[in-house]
Amino acid sequence: MFSRNLIRVPRLYRGLATHATLPQSTSLPAVLHLKTGQSFTGRSFGAPRSIYGETVFSTSITSYTESMTDPSYRGQILVFTTPLIGNYGVPHNTTAVDTQNVGVVLESPSIQCSAVVVADVAERFSHHTAVESLASWCARYNVPGISGVDTRAITRLLRDQGTTLGRLAVGTDATLSPPKAEEYWDPTTENLVAQASTKVPYDLNPTGDVKIAVLDFGAKANILRSLVRRGAAVTVLPWDFDFNAIRDRYDGLFLSNGPGDPNHCTPAAINLRRTLAEWNKPVFGICMGHQVIGMAAGLDAYRMTFGNRGHNQPVLALASSGSIRAGRVYVTSQNHQYALRLQDPFPEGWEPFFINCNDSSVEGIKSTAESGRRVWGVQFHPESAGGPLDTIEMFTDFLAECRAHKLQLGLQTGDVMGAKQEVPALGKEAPRPIAAAA
Ligand SMILES: NC(=O)CC[C@H](N)C(=O)O
């Protein structure tokens, strides 16, 4: 399937697009083993190495580059249900307009998933922003892939038996018998958030008019871009940083997405519980951030059978807020394995915000009007990348609330919290080089 030779660019396309002019990665025999006993034989692409991981499927049709660089896929073997992957190559992640070093397309500086599984990997790619093929990109980041397998059969298995631990065996490893049950590595036993989060605080767009602190559980770059593009000055903090120590410097708090089991984030939920009790400025969380808000509110996070991954998940709004109207269905981008448990009654001061139209899982929570708080959490990804922009204005809503609240505080009291705090100095390190990815 692959050749080490350079691929010739057909004359028709020359000058129109960047094509596969780089050497393709080596293709070897490969087998995907599932802990539940099934094995699928194909050919490798990308890095010629074997790995373990948690096997999950995504129904996204496009945006494989965004998905593969999403830190929430850390530790996972990502199966694409779309049969042809790689046809538009891998884009450049920098342009002159990227003044904040947050990139323009990709979600982090490197590929985050452990491996990819595709029915048919496109050796030739064609797109005006492409700089290399999927296979050569995977090889550069030491990530293996398998193609030539029946991804529909794998997806049906994962749907029926749930997300399953797996092993991608490449080269001579492909001739060995499947691993024993105890040999499979379970990434959810590790605190993947601690691995994906920034280790030191850093600032983006420091001259922005509204100051937002972001707790980084493994933030997608497009979340940071969505805040910065709307004028916010953003300080990105490590996931377990106690925001309470510096909270009066900020006009709002944002909690990001992140990989793995939310129960590893209990320290962050405990810090947040104090924030919510003592600080009345707007708070917004996405995916892992939403789960941490829910845990701080007293809700339980549970593991779903196969989760929701893809860019076509319909959610029904149960309440109106900002640009969101109760009763409307929004199509959303999602990548999660865990969800908040729907309970009746909901904790005092909280209400469900969105519900999934397919499986009725909780897709959002918010503080009630009576609570006097301004807190929202959504399980889906309003920043999309990839996916529909149906709910992108939730970022505008959040920042509008922060600006309005700031104005209100300024007019009324000037210093509503008033507490004298020891304020730790923020690190001086340069921003994480998100743009250096492709
Ligand atoms: N994208 C995310 O933040 C996912 C949250 C969590 N890791 C889950 O799988 O549910």
Image: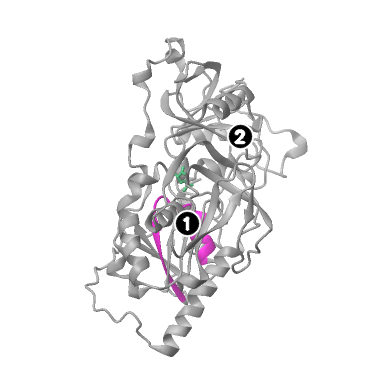
Q: Amino acid at mark 2?
A: Thr
- Residue 353 in the image, given as x and y percentages of width and height: 56, 58
Q: Where does residue 285 sit, x and y in percent of width and height?
A: 47, 58
Question: Quick one: quadrant of the N terminus?
Answer: top right
Q: Is residue 265 magenta?
A: no
Callout 2 environment at 10 Å: few (<14), some (14 to 19), or many (20+)?
some
**In screen coordinates, is 311 left or right of 258?**
right
Across and down, in percent, residue 59 comes to 62, 37
Q: Where 205 sits versus 268, above or below? A: below
Was residue 222 drawn as part of the magenta stretch in this picture? yes
Which of the two residues, 59 or 112, is positioned nearer the viewer here? 59
Could you say which is closer to the camera, residue 380 or residue 276? 276
Q: Quadrant of residue 246?
A: bottom left
Labels 1, 2: front one: 1
Q: Residues within 10 Å of mark 1 (few under 14, many from 20)?
A: some
Amino acid type at mark 1 = Phe
Quarter of the image for residue 249 reads: bottom left
Numbered label attached to residue 346: 1
The residue carrying mark 2 is 21
Colouring used for the render: one colour
Residue 418 lies in quadrant: bottom left
Q: Position of residue 165 (x, y in %)?
A: 44, 26
Highlighted magenta segment, given as a residue range: 210-228
Q: Nearer the viewer, residue 81 or 118?
A: 81
Up-down relation of residue 64 to residue 418 (above or below): above
Q: Residue furthest right?
A: 12
